[in-house]
Image (cartoon, rainbow, N blue to C red):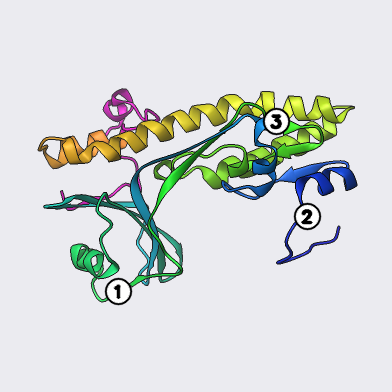
Amino acid sequence: MRLHEGARAPDAASLSAEYDLVVAADGAGSTIRTALAERFGTTVERTAPDYVWLGADRSFDSLTFLVSDTPRGPVVAHVYPYEPGRSTFLVEAAFKPTVDELSELFADRLPGARLLENQSRWSRFTQVSNAAWSHGNVVLVGDAAHTAHYSVGSGTRLALDDARALAAALRAEPSLPGALAAYETGRRPAVEHTQWIGRESADWFAGLADAGPSSPEEFLVDLVTRGGRISMGDLTADADGGAPAGTVVSGR
C-alpha cells in the first residue's frame, strides 16, 4: 500500500480507469461524488441555523450543552473534550455572534479559559443523501455518502461502520457489483435512521427561539428525548429519573 499524504487526488474518471475499486471517503463536499452526482442521485441541502466550530482551552468533563438566551435569540453550544485541556466548542445561533460576544455569553462556563479559532467561519449544516452509494467501481462511504446532523454526534461512527461493512462485503461476495450492493443494503437502514434522528434533533434546536418558558427539568427531558433515541419510557425506567450520564445543561 502506498500513501500519498497531502496529495491532490486525480479526477474520478482517471481513478476509475486505473483502479479496481475507488472508495470515495472525501467528506460532505466530496469532489468524486460531485463529479458523478447524477449517477449517485445526490441531494445536498443546507439547513438553518448557522453554526461555527471553535475550541476551548479547557477540558469539559463530558458532552455538555450550553444555552444562553439573548435579545436576538438563543445561542447554543455543543461542547465535548477531545484531549487533556482542550474541548470542541461548536456554537449555533441565527445572528452569528463574534467570538468576543460568545466569550462573554459563556464566561461563567469558561472561567479563565479562551475560545480558540482555527479558520473558523459561520456556515450551515450540509445534509447529504444519495439515491445510490456506488456507480461502477466507485463507492461512497461516510459523509461522502450521507451526513447526520452534528447534534447527534454520529458522523465518525457511521463512517467507520461503513468501512467495516464494505470490507466485510468485499470479502464475502464473489463479484464487485455484488459486494457493493450488499454493502449498501446492509448499511442504508441504520444510516437513514440516524439521519432521521439528526433531522429531529436539528429541528428541536432550531425551534428553541419559538419555545415557551419551561422549568429546568422540563427542558432537560425535552433535550434528552429530542431525537427519539431515548424515550419518556426510558427515562421513567431510570431509577434516578434523570438524564443519561454525560448530559449537562446550563443557562436556560
Q: Position of residue 113 (x, y in %)?
A: 29, 74
Please tell me whether mark 1 sits on a helix, a strand or a loop. Answer: loop
First in sequence, mark 2 or 1: give its number: 2
At 25% from the left and 64% from the top, the residue drawn is: 102
Q: Give amino acid for label 3.
A: Arg
Q: Which residue is mark 2?
A: 10
Residue 37 lies in the magenta stretch: no
Range shown magenta: 225-252
Residue 242 in sight from this viewpoint: no
Residue type for callout 2: Pro
Residue 91 coordinates in the image, percent (x, y): 33, 55
SS category of the residue bearing label 3: helix
Q: CA distance from mark 3 to mark 1?
A: 48 Å
Foreground: disc 2 or disc 1: 2
Relative depth, front residue between 136 and 202: 136
Give the amino acid type for the residue marked by disc 1 in the picture. Answer: Ala
Write down the residue under mark 3: 39
Q: Is residue 234 magenta?
A: yes
Q: Nearer the viewer, mark 3 or mark 1?
A: 3
**Image height check: is 246 above or below 165?**
below
Q: Position of residue 82 (x, y in %)?
A: 47, 62
Q: Which residue is mark 1?
A: 113
Measure the alpha-carbon separation of dots 2 and 3: 19 Å
Magenta-drawn stretch, dominant element (helix, strand or loop): loop
Residue nearest the viewer, comparing 154 with 146: 146
Residue drawn 45% across the image and 28% down it: 196
Looking at the image, residue 234 sits to the left or right of residue 155; the answer is left
Work out whether mark 2 precedes mark 3 in sequence or the reverse, and give the earlier one. 2
Percent of width and height locating residue 148 = 48, 38
Quadrant location of the N terminus?
A: bottom right
Describe residue 181's horizontal placement relative to residue 27 as left or right: right
Q: Are the residues at dot 2 and dot 1 in contact (C-beta closer than 8 Å)?
A: no
